[in-house]
Image (spheres, grey):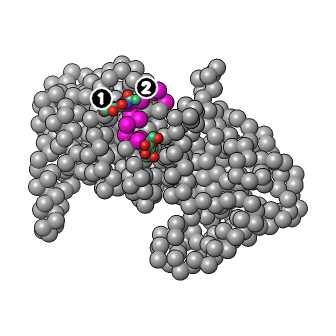
Amino acid sequence: MELLHLSLVLLLISAQCFTSSLSDVSQQPKASALTVLEQTEDDVGKVEDGTVEDDLDPEDMEVFYPTSEWQTVKPGQAIPAGLHVRLNLETGKNEAKIPDDERGNSGLKYWKQGRRQGMVNTNSKSFTAEELKRALKLMKQEGNIEVEEDHQEKVRKTFRPIKELMKDFEAMNVMMETDMEIINKLIDKFNSTSATLEEKIGALYDLEYYVHQVDNAKHLVSTGGLQLVINALNATEPLIQEYAAFVLGSTLSGNPKVQIEAMEAGSLQKLLVLLATDHPVAVKKKALFALASILRHFPFAQQQFLKLGGLQVLRQLFQARGTESLHVRVMTLLYDMVMEKKLIQEDKDSSAQHKEKCRQYDEVNLLPPMLEQGWCVLVPKLLTSAEHDTREKVLKTMNLMMAACRDEYQALQDLTASLIMLRSEYENLAAEEQREGDQDGYFLGLLNSVNSIIQKLG
Ligand SMILES: *[C@@H]1O[C@H](CO)[C@@H](O)[C@H](O)[C@H]1NC(C)=O
Ligand SMILES: *[C@@H]1O[C@H](CO)[C@@H](O)[C@H](O)[C@H]1NC(C)=O
């Protein structure tokens, strides 16, 4: 039984049909994952509810709200699965909309974004009272399923409500397909020689949504879809490369089996080639995301990364002009790898499994070549960033490398002066933060980091 994601957010495109019978719904508290967005067409695109659950590439947090009209997708905006996506060749921008009636004739379309789903009526831009009543019923039942989503066994026992839901959907003339059926279709579409570039990119967009689930990712591997995606990393179209890397990165995230498969399929080499050669920044950004996903918690891949000269590739990327947005990501990736090994080594676990892990990490010698390649000097350069978030990462990385880099830090001409300036900036911000009763202490944390470095540099 394929678990269907039934979190349902009704996105109502039209307000006028909706006021009397449903006013009780729109007043429901926002505590649940369910929200009814009552919107006029002019409102579409505004987000009413800040609780977007999002496990995509962290940069792609902004939600795109689809309608039946083409709308420009802003850079970095995540697009819900199931949409029709095209590249506007005049503007060079991506556009997306809800597909024209391809599944039956009801005009009701579903879209998904993380745990959100929405429904839009593409025919009349309004729902009949009957459709709304049904949707409400679904939303009420959904409450139960949501809670039990983490416990697959329990969900199996609640088979009946899901079945009833399916019936409701069928009655609404909306076909619910299992994730695996959808993935098969997307793979076929992507693999089809007759599909246009836009259709292929659309298929990759949609796949990316599905592969976050471990079972779906495995399905992609077992049907040969992952190999197709990896092959597409060296496609001639940059957009295909970009979205293939995006799908690959999401498929790999936290999925050791798929990490192994992807290594065997040669994806590490391909990603490094993408990063080392001339490609648009957008392609490199996703390639870096996929690289981080394949390396994370996978010492064998980290070893191979070093053997293949991955560190030089990152260094080149870190120093290249026009890729400033990638520098922080590169540094974060290195920080994560150094930290990962450190945490494993510091763990006092005495099990055989842990010993084996330590043995594997012993063979990942990242720090010596990092020092050789001058990372001690490279990292502090990012301190000039105006972004607190970037500075935070630089400070963390500098602290992590302090023991090895202390002499080189001390020899850096302007470093002490920059640190003292940062200290005074964060003293002020931390004081303000405290006055405002902000418990988070974000700036205080930054201040402590700066102070710690100043002190160690003595
Ligand atoms: C892709 O298409 C080719 C040629 O039609 C076919 O042989 C192959 O099995 C397809 N791959 C997948 C994963 O569907
Ligand atoms: C990508 O590289 C593989 C070999 O690594 C090759 O078989 C395939 O044809 C290449 N694809 C394209 C589109 O160049």
Cα separation between marks 2 and 1: 14 Å
Q: Nearer the viewer, residue 327 or 233?
A: 233
Task: From the viewer's perspective, tell me whether residue 401 is left or right of residue 173.
Answer: left
Q: Nearer the viewer, residue 98 or 359?
A: 98
Q: Secondary structure at mark 2?
A: loop
- At a point 12% along the width and 67% down the height, the residue shown is 352
Residue carrying label 2: 236
The image shows residue 53 at horizontal and vertical percentages of: 54, 54
> Dot 2, crowdedness within 10 Å: few (<14), some or many (≥20)?
few
The image shows residue 215 at horizontal and vertical percentages of: 43, 60
Q: Write the start and end of the magenta stretch as one range.
A: 228-239
For the residue marked with disc 1, what is the amino acid?
Val
Instruction: Quadrant for residue 372, please give it.
Output: top left
- Judged by depth in the image, the label closer to the viewer, 2 or 1, is 2
For the residue marked with disc 2, what is the amino acid?
Thr
- Residue 33 highlighted magenta (yes or no): no
- At a point 68% along the width and 40% down the height, the residue shown is 97
Residue carrying label 1: 273
Task: From the viewer's perspective, tell me whether residue 293 is left or right of residue 55.
Answer: left
Task: From the viewer's perspective, tell me whether residue 21 is left or right of residue 403.
Answer: right
Q: Earlier in the sequence, mark 2 or mark 1?
A: 2
The image shows residue 289 at horizontal and vertical percentages of: 38, 40
- At a point 80% along the width and 67% down the height, the residue shown is 133
In the depicted structure, whether residue 58 falls above or below residue 343: above
In the depicted structure, whether residue 77 falls above or below residue 168: above
For label 2, being within 8 Å of ligand 2 is answered yes
Task: From the viewer's perspective, tell me whether residue 456 is left or right of residue 221.
Answer: left
Instruction: Quadrant for residue 160, please give it.
Output: bottom right
Q: Could you tell me if the residues under marks 2 and 1 are in contact, i.e. CB atoms within 8 Å?
A: no
Q: Nearer the viewer, residue 336 or 75?
A: 75
